[in-house]
């Protein structure tokens, strides 16, 4: 099984080590370091997720983006395609099985494979400490931030293994606060 690994090596992509890219390029390079690779990025229509999707596409990957809202998907796809990048997108609430299935199917239909899964979608319905949060709040946090990425990876892993190549990146924490 693939391990989730991200290490830095001179700011370049190293297939044996993980993904780290640092560059000032703003255009697509179909012969880039990620040419012929396919990336699926959840929660990728704005912010960090959008930046990750853009960077992967700029380095030659075919990228499938997703968001819970169709208008966000449409706007992000139009913006990235307007930059000449290879992207497709779909609505996907990662907590819904049918949406995860649609995301996997789009990646396979659009690109025929999957090499990267970046789980950026997350939930934190509590402002402040979660220590006093209700069980319902904890269920939502764990379902979206832990269970959904694991289920999505289990759906994509067979296709990643067929290619003999695959990386899953995700964030386990959705917030940080300094001790008072």
Image (cartoon, rainbow, N blue to C red):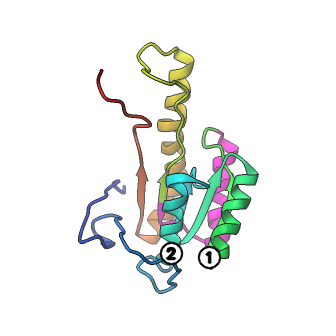
* Coordinates of residue 180 in the picture (x, y in percent): 30, 20
Residue 110 in magenta stretch: yes
Disc 1: which residue: 83
Q: Are marks 1 and 2 in contact (CB under 8 Å)?
A: yes
Above or below, comparing residue 35 to residue 112 in the picture:
below
Where are the magenta residues, as a range? 96-116
x and y, in percent, of residue 131 in the image: 41, 16
* Residue pictured at 48% horizontal, 80% vertical: 35
Instruction: Please state the horizontal and vertical placement of residue 88, each as a whole percent of the image.
Output: 66, 66
Residue occupied by mark 2: 58
Q: Residues within 10 Å of mark 2 (few under 14, many from 20)?
A: many
Secondary structure mostly taken by the magenta-highlighted segment of the chain = helix
Q: Residue at x 36, y 57 (%)?
A: 2
Residue at 48% from the left image edge and 68% from the top image edge: 55
Q: Residue 126, which numbered label?
A: none
Residue at 48% across, 61% down: 52
User: Which label's residue is closer to the chain start, 1 or 2?
Assistant: 2
Left or right of 144, for residue 76: right
Report whether 175 appears left or right of 80.
left
Above/below status of 174 relative to 134: below
The answer to which image quadrant residue 84 occupies is bottom right
State the separation of the CA atoms marked 1 and 2.
Answer: 9 Å
């Amino acid at each position: 099984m693939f391990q989730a690994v991200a290490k830095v090596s001179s700011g370049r992509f190293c297939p044996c080590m993980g993904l780290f890219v640092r560059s000032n390029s703003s255009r697509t390079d179909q012969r880039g370091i990620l040419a012929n690779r396919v990336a699926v990025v959840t929660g990728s229509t704005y912010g960090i997720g959008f930046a990750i999707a853009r960077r992967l596409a700029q380095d030659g990957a075919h990228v499938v983006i997703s968001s819970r809202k169709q208008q966000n998907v449409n706007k992000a796809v139009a913006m990235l395609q307007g930059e000449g990048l290879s992207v497709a997108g779909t609505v996907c609430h990662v907590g819904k099985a049918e949406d995860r299935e649609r995301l996997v199917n789009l990646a396979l239909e659009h690109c025929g494979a999957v090499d990267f899964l970046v789980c950026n979608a997350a939930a934190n319905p509590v402002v402040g400490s979660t220590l006093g949060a209700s069980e319902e709040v904890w269920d939502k946090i764990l379902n979206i931030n832990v269970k959904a990425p694991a289920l999505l990876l289990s759906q994509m892993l067979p296709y990643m293994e067929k290619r003999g190549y695959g990386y899953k990146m995700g964030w386990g924490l959705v917030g940080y606060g300094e001790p008072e």
